[in-house]
């Protein structure tokens, strides 16, 4: 059973106590954000989309369905995925967990897919 919520938030938004455990889920450190300002507890580059599919997607909403299938397939075969899911699950027993990211689009990005993937695997 999960005790706390799993949410997502842009790294450019001010961190808050309600965020709980903050995991940066971007492959590259966000531009213009100091480590102190980002207030990150963990940075998990290994769980992010490969550069190849990220560049092909290029944050184009019309490519999102393709991107979701491609990224989901990457997650299914990612050797770090199970460990990541277990880590998130363990943290959710103690506090909220927030996936932190830099993308401007809050609807069409990899974090939306990652949250769905993690929630599906924790059930």
Image (cartoon, rainbow, N blue to C red):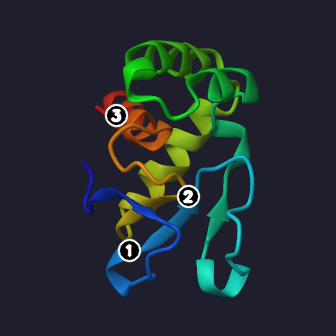
Question: Of the residues under marks 3 and 1, which one precedes in the sequence?
Answer: 1
Q: Quadrant of residue 35?
A: bottom right
Q: Which residue is mark 2?
A: 102
- Residue nearer the viewer, 54 or 115: 54
Q: Which residue is mark 3?
A: 116
Mark 2 vs mark 3, foreground winner is: 2
Q: CA distance from mark 2 to mark 3?
A: 18 Å
Q: Which residue is mark 1?
A: 19
Is 48 positioned to the left or the right of 16 in the image? right
Q: Position of residue 89 (x, y in %)?
A: 42, 49
Look at the numbered disc 2 and give the secondary structure of its residue: loop
Above or below: residue 94 compared with residue 48: below
Q: Residue at x 62, y 39 (%)?
A: 83
- Circle 1 packing at 10 Å, graded few (<14), some (14-19), many (20+), is many
Q: Residue at x 70, y 25 (%)?
A: 79
Q: Quadrant of residue 96?
A: bottom left
Look at the numbered disc 3 and give the secondary structure of its residue: helix
- Circle 2 packing at 10 Å, graded few (<14), some (14-19), many (20+), is many
Question: Of the residues under marks 1 and 2, which one precedes in the sequence?
Answer: 1
Q: Residue at x 75, y 52 (%)?
A: 28
Q: CA distance from mark 3 to mark 1?
A: 18 Å
Look at the numbered disc 1 and give the secondary structure of its residue: helix
Q: Residue at x 27, y 63 (%)?
A: 4
| Count of numbered circles in the view | 3
């Amino acid at each position: 059973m999960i005790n706390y919520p799993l949410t997502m938030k842009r790294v450019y938004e001010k961190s808050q106590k309600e965020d709980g455990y903050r995991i940066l889920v971007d492959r590259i450190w966000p531009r213009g954000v100091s480590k102190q300002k980002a207030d990150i507890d963990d940075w998990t580059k290994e769980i992010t989309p490969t550069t190849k599919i990220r560049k092909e997607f290029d944050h184009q909403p019309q490519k999102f369905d393709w991107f979701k299938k491609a990224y989901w397939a990457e997650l299914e075969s990612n050797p770090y995925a199970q460990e990541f899911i277990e880590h998130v699950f363990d943290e959710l027993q103690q506090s909220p967990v927030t996936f932190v990211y830099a993308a401007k689009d809050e609807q069409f990005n990899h974090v939306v897919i990652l949250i769905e993937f993690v929630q599906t695997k924790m059930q």
